[in-house]
Image (tube, rainbow, N blue to C red):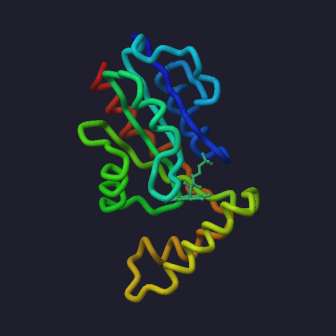
Amino acid sequence: MKKIVIYESATGFTKKYAEWIAEELQAEIKDTRTMNGVNLTEYDLVVFGGWLMGGRISGLEKIQKQNTKKLVVFATGASLDTKELVEEIRNANSLSGILFFYLPGGMHYSQLGFMKKTMLKMVKKSITKKENKTEAELHMEKVICTDFDMTDKKYITPLLEACEERE
Ligand SMILES: Cc1cc2nc3c(=O)[nH]c(=O)nc-3n(C[C@H](O)[C@H](O)[C@H](O)COP(=O)(O)O)c2cc1C
């Protein structure tokens, strides 16, 4: 069975999950920047992971362009893992009928450039203005402009199980 894990990662959280998943699946691994020439239709299983930016999964459109029959998608983000979040991500990224997993990432805020920091400050401001914040909003408000890491290898277990079911 030919398997590949493809990822897009700006600050390393998604890369870390992609490496854990590839190791467990004994799959090839490629960054979206180095996947030119890779024909995904040749693979029995393609796992794609990208980081969330404004609710969109970075790099996903590069994979959706190709005709991959067995696709499993994951996204990392700074958000808490909730049913609502997973539903929102599915809807915003046309993932109906595709196996999808949210894997808690983190933030390397101090490594980000001016534009990204500005965007995050704006998000923080808009949350601060809200009344009756949800637990997920309170979490975002607290951490969005800080450095933190929620990654844990245990979170990949459901994704691995779903990949095995597909074999
Ligand atoms: C400009 C910007 C927008 C972001 N938007 C979201 C978002 O909509 N939802 C979320 O959960 N995390 C969001 N994040 C957090 C990243 O998705 C998170 O840091 C991710 O784990 C980074 O992965 P990477 O280290 O592989 O780049 C955003 C981060 C930046 C810099």
Quadrant placement of the C terminus: top left
User: Could you say which quadrant of the image residue 45 lies in?
Assistant: top left
Q: Nearer the viewer, residue 121 or 72?
A: 121
Identified at 48% across, 32% down, the residue is 62
Quadrant in which ligand 1 is drawn? bottom right
> From the viewer's perspective, is residue 64 above or below residue 3?
below
Please state the total of marks drawn on the protein image. 0
Picture coordinates of residue 6, whole percent (x, y): 52, 29
Q: Residue at x 33, y 23 (%)?
A: 70
| Quadrant the N terminus occupies | top left
Rendered image quadrant of residue 143 = bottom right
Q: Residue at x 72, y 57 (%)?
A: 112
Residue ID at (52%, 38%): 59
Residue 145 in the figure: left or right of residue 81: right
- In the depicted view, which residue is nearer to us: 66 or 8? 66
Q: Position of residue 42 (x, y in %)?
A: 42, 10
Residue 76 picture location, percent across and down: 50, 49
In the displayed structure, does residue 87 sit left or right of residue 13?
left
In the displayed structure image, the side of residue 76 where residue 157 appears, left or right:
left
User: Residue 28's spot in the image, x, y percent?
Assistant: 54, 18
Q: Is residue 43 above or below residue 18?
A: above
